[in-house]
Image (cartoon, rainbow, N blue to C red):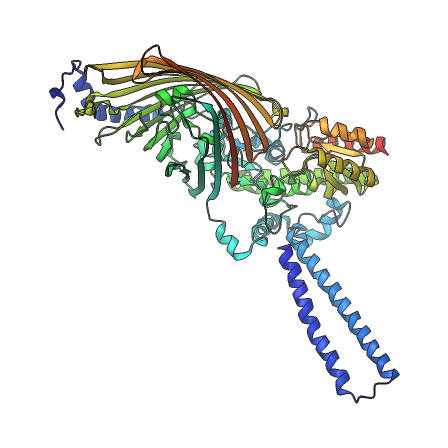
């Protein structure tokens, strides 16, 4: 290697020094960065003693708030009118996740497209998968439609662990609430009695409400309906509805003309009049099907917050059941 | 599983039936051969009996089969019954059924058992072997096939190529870390595109990544080929920031949220790399490290609109000092400084997120590259490059987009390439993608003032196997 000076090169004065110490400078820069990062910003102030809960969906936030009362702040990442499969991993959620003591997820790979990077980047050790503040609600619920045998995407965006829309069964709501109450008691043993009392109160109110809902739905036992996505198996099972078809040819696959024609034939044959559509899906195909079959398209929110008046877990069922009743009555 | 159950049932049926037949054939022969009318009747009768018993067995097996099937649906009625029994059995159960169910065990026990129930659930489909597989990382493969037609004299690409098959392996390592590896099998060989461990549980809100990774320099440098909204990379990336591989090197990255004004999110990232990245940096010695710094500011303007801004800086040694006119020089003096700014505006209405969205993005790069002039004098070339792109999702399956490019050459700022592209993308499903791109380039040739026009049509097929990856944001 010939030295630099052997060539007719103009080297700016001082540049040599400057470069020689590059490594030192880098190290210093890094150290400075780390120091700034480490010192910058005191931990954000939080409401005294309240357990900060973040949930993936609004239903879980509603349940957490029911049992947590004024000892918790529960907030959802996804809105009730948003498709929970497709939520943007916005950095603004990171700030909230960083402060969270507890993260409640739906699980069963519902949030697989957006939650993992948020959890990783939150820099919150508590809510990492398996951490003390990571709570998978599906472990407490009764899960339907668990595929058996080989699972392939020829069946669309299947969830190999079962249908993740399980919160639409009040019994699952109760089970999840119980799980959350126990978790909260474990986190704040001093308030265990409070959470237990909140839970038993919730249990009583939900049982009363469920009786009302079941009696409201009783006249429509075994009614056949068609839904856009497979969001309603738990709801249908609990309230004795019979979901006979889907607007989507496969979960997550947009409607195809051929499937739509088949669905129309099936609906005519089985005399199905009600097409339930989640608020985040396009109404064009459902409307066309309704026109063909003389049926009715019913936009039914599957989550709390799906409509303005759906503010909690109870009003979700109140709203959906009232809408269903109306639709069944008008299409009979 | 279902198929196995059925074939099992059939097999047991066959085995169960075989001795019956044997017996039936044996018995008449044992009797004296006085084959008269009554004995024929008796024979028919035994046959009828046997058929009946077989039918019973079939019914029994059917019952067992359906039991088995029901067991798959984890409806652990007795367990969950502690809380409530399933309403599908007892309408109006919530209050009615809880009473008879609870005496068996107090309510408090129920959740623990529910947990056990679900743990059993994972076992119900698969058995012992697939339980072992549960610890395997999430594996995916993304195939990226690119075809090119038209002409380009400056940077011709192959007519058809399996551009890359990227294998992704992702797993949670332990409660404190996760790891991601992306290995790209391309036309020219295998390359570790990224392989790094992320420590998620560090104190002081620090996030550390160690391994080989795409540097946090701007936006497009961090995005894998298959996640780009175009088939190629912008001219500015190709000319100034290392092309397709970009700044992608082995090193350590530390990032942290920064204190920010209300409603803003800010994050700072500092990275140190060995200093070998495509044609941007080249490390001859251990101390030839390169650094990357990035600050990101993000704000939700409304629920559906957000603004994402960033400034980046990078510095490292280039190869201009290593070989020039067959003379080796001291690489100490030949540095490249890169500066970048990026801005992204996104619009995605939450209610119609899967049908409509819009993204506008621009990035600008300034490169200051130390090198030798043709007369072997030390000089620094200051080149500027930028691109602006937009994409609009028309409906669930179609997206249209466009991109404008302009960039100087890193080693000769007087040569400027210009180009634009129009892009059309079709998604049969979330797991495959078909894309076409028309690309026009007004590309500078070695003599200043000489240009070559490139008119090309590119098409791309992308497919995703295996684990469902996260959607890029």
Q: In the visual, does A107 lie left or right of B7?
A: left
Which residue is rendered at x = 32% and y = 27% of the image? A34
Query: Residue B390 at x, y = what percent?
Result: 52, 18
Which of these two is toward me, B205 or B127?
B127
Q: Quadrant of residue A135?
A: top right
Q: Residue furthest right?
A: B37
Can residue A21 be seen from the camera position used here?
A: no
A86 versus B387 height, above or below: below
Can residue B350 be seen from the camera position used here?
A: yes
B384 versus B243 height, above or below: above
Which residue is rendered at x = 28% and y = 29% of the image? B275
Q: In the visual, does B145 lie left or right of A82?
A: left
Which of these two is toward me, A316 or B188?
B188
Query: Residue B24 at x, y = what percent?
Result: 75, 79
Query: Residue B357 at x, y = what percent?
Result: 58, 22
Query: Residue B242 at x, y = what percent?
Result: 35, 25
Position of the N terminus of chain B, as image quadrant, is bottom right
**How many discs appear?**
0
């Amino acid at each position: 290697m010939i030295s630099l000076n052997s060539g007719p090169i103009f080297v700016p004065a001082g540049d040599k020094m400057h470069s020689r110490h590059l490594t030192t400078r880098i190290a210093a820069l890094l150290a400075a960065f780390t120091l700034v990062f480490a010192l910058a910003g005191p931990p954000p102030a939080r409401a005294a003693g309240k357990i900060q809960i973040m949930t993936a969906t609004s239903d879980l936030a509603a349940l957490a708030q029911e049992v947590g009362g004024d000892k918790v702040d529960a907030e959802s990442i996804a809105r009730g009118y948003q498709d929970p499969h497709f939520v943007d991993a916005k950095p603004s959620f990171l700030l909230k996740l960083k402060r969270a003591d507890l993260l409640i997820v739906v699980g069963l790979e519902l949030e697989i497209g957006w939650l993992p990077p948020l959890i990783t980047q939150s820099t919150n050790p508590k809510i990492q998968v398996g951490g003390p503040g990571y709570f998978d609600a599906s472990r407490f619920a009764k899960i339907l439609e668990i595929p058996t045998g080989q699972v392939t995407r020829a069946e669309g965006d299947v969830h190999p662990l079962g249908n993740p829309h399980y919160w639409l069964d009040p019994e699952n709501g109760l089970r999840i609430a119980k799980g959350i109450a126990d978790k909260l008691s474990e986190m704040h043993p001093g308030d265990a009695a409070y959470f237990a009392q909140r839970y038993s109160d919730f249990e009583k109110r939900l049982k009363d409400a469920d009786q009302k809902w079941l009696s409201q739905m009783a006249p429509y036992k075994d009614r056949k309906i068609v839904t856009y996505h497979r969001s309603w198996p738990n709801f249908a099972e609990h309230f004795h509805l019979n979901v006979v078809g889907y607007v989507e040819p496969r979960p997550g696959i947009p409607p195809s003309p051929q499937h739509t024609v088949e669905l129309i034939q099936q609906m005519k044959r089985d005399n199905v009049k009600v097409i339930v559509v989640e608020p985040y899906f396009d109404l064009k195909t459902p409307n066309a099907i309704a026109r063909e079959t003389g049926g009715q398209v019913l936009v039914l929110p599957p989550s709390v917050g799906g409509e303005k008046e759906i503010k909690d877990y109870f009003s979700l069922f109140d709203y959906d059941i009232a809408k269903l009743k109306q639709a069944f009555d008008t299409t009979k | 599983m279902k198929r196995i159950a059925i074939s099992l049932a059939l097999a047991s049926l066959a085995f169960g039936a075989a001795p019956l037949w044997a017996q039936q054939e044996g018995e008449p022969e044992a009797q004296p051969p006085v084959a008269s009318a009554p004995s024929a009747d008796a024979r028919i009768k035994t046959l009828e009996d046997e058929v009946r018993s077989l039918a019973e067995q079939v019914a029994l097996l059917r019952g067992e089969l359906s039991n088995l099937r029901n067991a798959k649906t984890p409806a652990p009625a007795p367990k969950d019954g502690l809380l409530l029994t399933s309403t599908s059995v007892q309408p109006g159960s919530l209050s009615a059924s809880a009473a008879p169910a609870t005496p068996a065990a107090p309510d408090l026990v129920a959740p623990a058992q529910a947990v056990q129930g679900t743990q059993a659930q994972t076992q119900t489909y698969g058995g012992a072997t697939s339980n072992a597989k549960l610890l395997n990382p999430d594996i995916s493969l993304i195939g990226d096939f690119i075809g090119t037609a038209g002409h380009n004299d400056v940077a011709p690409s192959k007519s058809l190529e399996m551009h890359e098959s990227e294998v992704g392996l992702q797993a949670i390592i332990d409660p404190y870390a996760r790891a991601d590896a992306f290995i790209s099998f391309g036309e020219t060989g295998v390359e570790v595109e990224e392989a790094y461990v992320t420590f998620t549980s560090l104190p002081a809100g620090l996030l550390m990544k160690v391994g080989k990774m795409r540097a946090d320099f701007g936006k497009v440098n961090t995005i894998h080929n298959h996640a780009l909204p175009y088939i190629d990379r912008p001219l500015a990336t190709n000319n100034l920031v290392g092309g397709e591989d970009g700044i992608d090197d082995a090193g350590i990255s530390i990032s942290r949220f920064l204190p920010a004004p209300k409603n803003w999110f800010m994050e700072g990232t500092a990275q140190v790399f060995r200093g070998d990245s495509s044609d941007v940096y080249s490390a001859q010695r251990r101390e030839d490290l390169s650094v990357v710094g990035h600050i990101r500011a993000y704000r939700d303007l409304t629920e559906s609109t957000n603004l994402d801004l960033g400034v980046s800086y990078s510095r490292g040694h280039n190869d201009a000092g290593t070989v020039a006119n067959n003379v080796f020089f001291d690489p100490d003096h030949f540095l490249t400084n890169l500066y970048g700014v990026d801005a992204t505006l996104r619009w995605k209405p939450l209610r119609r997120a899967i049908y409509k969205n819009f993204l506008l993005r621009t990035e600008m790069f300034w490169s200051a590259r130390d090198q030798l002039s043709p007369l072997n004098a030390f000089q620094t070339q200051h080149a500027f490059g930028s691109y602006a792109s937009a994409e609009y999702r028309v409906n669930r399956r179609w997206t249209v987009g466009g991109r404008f490019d302009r960039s100087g050459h890193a080693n000769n700022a007087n040569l400027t390439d210009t180009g634009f592209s129009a892009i059309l993308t079709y998604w049969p499903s979330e797991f495959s993608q078909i894309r076409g791109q028309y690309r026009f380039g007004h590309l500078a040739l070695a003599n200043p003032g000489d240009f070559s026009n490139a008119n090309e049509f590119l098409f791309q097929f992308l497919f995703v196997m295996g684990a469902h990856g996260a959607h890029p944001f």
